[in-house]
Image (cartoon, grey):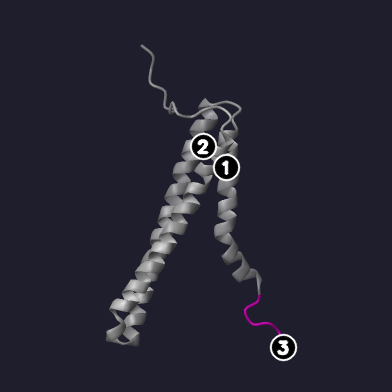
Amino acid sequence: MQPASPMPQTVSRGDLRRGILAGLAPLARLVALVALTLVLTAIARTVTASLGFFAQQQVSVLVFSVGLLLGIAVYIVSCVRLLRRIAVWQRYVADTPLAAGALWTLATSAVIVLLPFLLAILLPQHPAP
C-alpha cells in the first residue's frame, strides 16, 4: 500500500496558464471585495440619507473601514495559501512552469496593489510654488 501523496492529482506538468490563473486569484478576491465594499457603502448612504450628514458620514467611514480590514485579511490569507500551494508544486512537480507562472503573477499583483501607495508617497502632495 502506497502512502497518499499531498500533491493533488489534477496538477499537470507544464501548465503555465493554470499557474498564472492561480497567481491572479488573490487579486481577483481583493477586487471583488472592493466592489462589494463600494456597493455596501452606496446602500448604507441610501439607508442613512434621512439621518443627516454626520450620521451618514460615520456609517460610510465604518463600512469603508470594515471593508479595508477585511480586504487586507483576505489578500494576506489568499497570498499565504497560494505560496503554500506553490511550495507543494515546487517540491513534487519538478521543472514545472506552473509554480513559476504563479510566482510571477503573484509578484505582479503585489506591485499592482502597492502602486497607489507608492505613488502617494513619491508624488508631492503640495507642489512648490
Pointer 1 with pointer 3, Cβ within 8 A: no
**Residue at left 44%, top 62%?**
34
What's the magenta bit mostly, secondary-structure-wise? loop
Magenta span of residues: 124-129
Q: How far apart are labels 2 and 3 at the CA level?
A: 51 Å
Q: Secondary structure at mark 2?
A: helix
Residue 14 position by quadrant: top right
Q: Secondary structure at mark 3?
A: loop
Circle on res. 86: 2
Quarter of the picture holding the N terminus: top left
Task: Give the labeled residue for mark 1.
Answer: 103
Look at the image and tell me whether residue 65 can be seen: no
Mark 1: few, some, or many residues within 10 Å (few <14, many ≥20)? many
Residue 101 position by quadrant: top right
Q: Is residue 36 left or right of residue 99?
A: left
Pointer 1 with pointer 2, Cβ within 8 A: yes
Instruction: Give the percent coordinates (x, y) of residue 65.
Output: 39, 69
Q: Is residue 111 left or right of residue 58?
A: right
Task: Give the labeled residue for mark 3.
Answer: 129
Circle on res. 24: none
Q: Amino acid at mark 2?
A: Ile
Vertical comparison of 56 with 73: above or below: below
Q: How far apart are labels 1 and 3 at the CA level?
A: 44 Å
Label 1 or label 3, whichever lies nearer to me, is 1
Q: Amino acid at mark 1?
A: Leu
Q: Secondary structure at mark 1?
A: helix
Task: In this rendered view, identify the residue nearer to me: 80 or 23.
Answer: 23
